[in-house]
Image: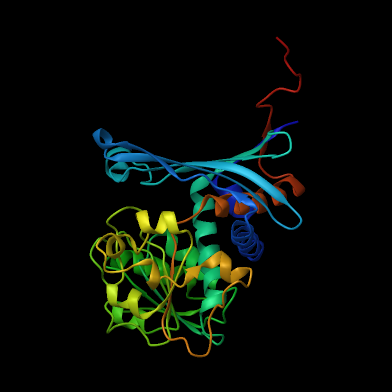
């Protein structure tokens, strides 16, 4: 047996976004049913290097497949300037749960972008208005691309407004998508008036005000992934149907972490978890809903689900680099 080594290009090539969206939705459902194991994300803080490591293991059992894996990821903000490396890098080990054989070692950075977009698409599918044709994006970094790529699979997006302080990033984003969408630069307020809004920034002071947001906008709050990060005004969270991915993670490091720990927002203000909506235990969007918000911190089950899709396609199409990691002979001692 051989292990597949899949670099960033191979992960991209073998990601079928529609299938990743379905797999991530399956993962949310498995988690809600109790058919998943996902220990809390663990952190190794390295203040001497202005960085940290995070480990994210998970196992999930969907209706007709199961999968296991672990993602090892870092955040080192000084990397681009000091080492010409990305701020965030990840490695995914994808294993056969039946016998623990490592089926693949793959780039986790590209995988993270794909599954994050897919998670937003799942939330959008359940919480946005059915005829959503406009999308705003605040933050034109790498995550913004898969937000549009995935959400356009579940809603007929035509017009896109992208807002970022970095004009070069905005120009790159527009150039990338201009053949597919009516995409233009705009203010935060213009982006926030769209039918669907994804926020993908690392800010700690809210940049989207209650006054800016559309009265029927669905917001994917994707940027907050650590304590102190906070993109949306508290009033937006309090006035919305607020859906989270996981209570422990969102209260610790999600969009709600600041107002939650300040006592501004409580459990009573949280409508439910996305998995409960997926399995039908609670309703998604109804005709009476105004603003809806999905607070996404990123779950290990999403990584495993996306890795499942990537591995199956790579294995079927002989992509990647097979190598003998474990050895084929069982050692006895």
- The residue drawn where x is 66% and y is 42% is 320
Can the viewer see residue 180 in this picture? no
- The residue drawn where x is 47% and y is 43% is 90
- The residue drawn where x is 50% and y is 79% is 181
Spot the residue most to the bottom: 287
**Looking at the image, what colour scheme do you see?**
rainbow
Depth check: give the residue in front, 276 or 200. Answer: 276
Q: Where does the image place residue 32, in percent across and percent down from the top left?
A: 59, 60
Spot the residue most to the front: 268
Considering only vertical position in the picture, is 168 above or below 301? below
Numbered-mark total: 0
- The residue drawn where x is 62% and y is 58% is 27
Left of 281 or right of it: where is 322?
Answer: right
Spot the residue most to the top: 333
Q: Where does the image place residue 37, in percent across and percent down from the top left?
A: 59, 47
Depth check: give the residue in front, 1 or 245. Answer: 245
Depth check: give the residue in front, 296 or 132. Answer: 296
Can the viewer see residue 171 in this picture? yes
**Quadrant placement of the C terminus:** top right
Q: Where does the image place residue 142, in percent across and percent down from the top left?
A: 42, 59
Considering only vertical position in the picture, is 59 above or below 245? above
Left of 315 or right of it: where is 190?
Answer: left
Depth check: give the residue in front, 179 or 31. Answer: 31
Q: Where does the image place residue 73, in percent across and percent down from the top left?
A: 44, 42
Left of 305 or right of it: where is 250?
Answer: left
Tell me which corner region of the image, top left, top right, bottom left or bottom right, holds residue 240.
Answer: bottom left
**Quadrant placement of the N terminus:** top right
């Amino acid at each position: 047996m051989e292990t597949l080594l899949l670099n960033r290009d191979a992960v991209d090539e073998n990601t079928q976004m529609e299938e990743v969206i379905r797999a991530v939705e399956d993962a949310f459902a498995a988690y809600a049913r109790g058919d998943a194991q996902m220990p809390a994300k663990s952190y190794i803080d390295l203040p001497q290097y202005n960085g940290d490591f995070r480990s994210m293991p998970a196992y999930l059992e969907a209706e007709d497949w199961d999968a296991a894996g672990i993602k090892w990821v870092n955040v080192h903000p000084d990397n681009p300037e000091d080492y010409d490396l990305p701020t965030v890098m990840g490695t995914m080990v994808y294993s056969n749960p039946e016998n623990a054989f490592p089926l693949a070692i793959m780039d986790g950075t590209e995988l993270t972008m794909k599954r994050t977009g897919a998670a937003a698409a799942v939330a959008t599918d359940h919480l946005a208005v059915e005829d959503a044709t406009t999308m705003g994006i605040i933050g034109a970094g790498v995550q913004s691309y898969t937000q549009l790529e995935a959400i356009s699979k579940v809603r007929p997006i035509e017009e896109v407004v992208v807002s970022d302080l970095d004009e070069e990033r905005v120009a790159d984003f527009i150039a990338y998508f201009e053949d597919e969408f009516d995409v233009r630069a705009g203010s935060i307020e213009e982006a926030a008036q769209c039918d669907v809004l994804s926020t993908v920034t690392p800010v700690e002071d809210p940049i989207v005000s209650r006054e800016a947001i559309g009265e029927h906008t669905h917001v994917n709050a994707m940027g907050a992934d650590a304590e102190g990060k906070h993109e949306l005004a508290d009033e937006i969270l309090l006035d919305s149907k607020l859906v989270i991915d996981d209570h422990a993670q969102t209260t610790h490091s999600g969009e709600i972490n600041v107002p939650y720990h300040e006592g501004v927002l409580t459990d009573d203000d949280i409508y439910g978890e996305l998995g409960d909506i997926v399995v039908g235990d609670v309703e998604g969007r109804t005709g009476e809903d105004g603003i809806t918000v999905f607070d996404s911190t990123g779950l290990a089950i999403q990584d495993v689900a996306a890795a499942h899709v990537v591995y199956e396609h790579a294995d079927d199409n002989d992509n990647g680099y097979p190598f003998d990691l474990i050895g084929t002979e069982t050692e006895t001692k």
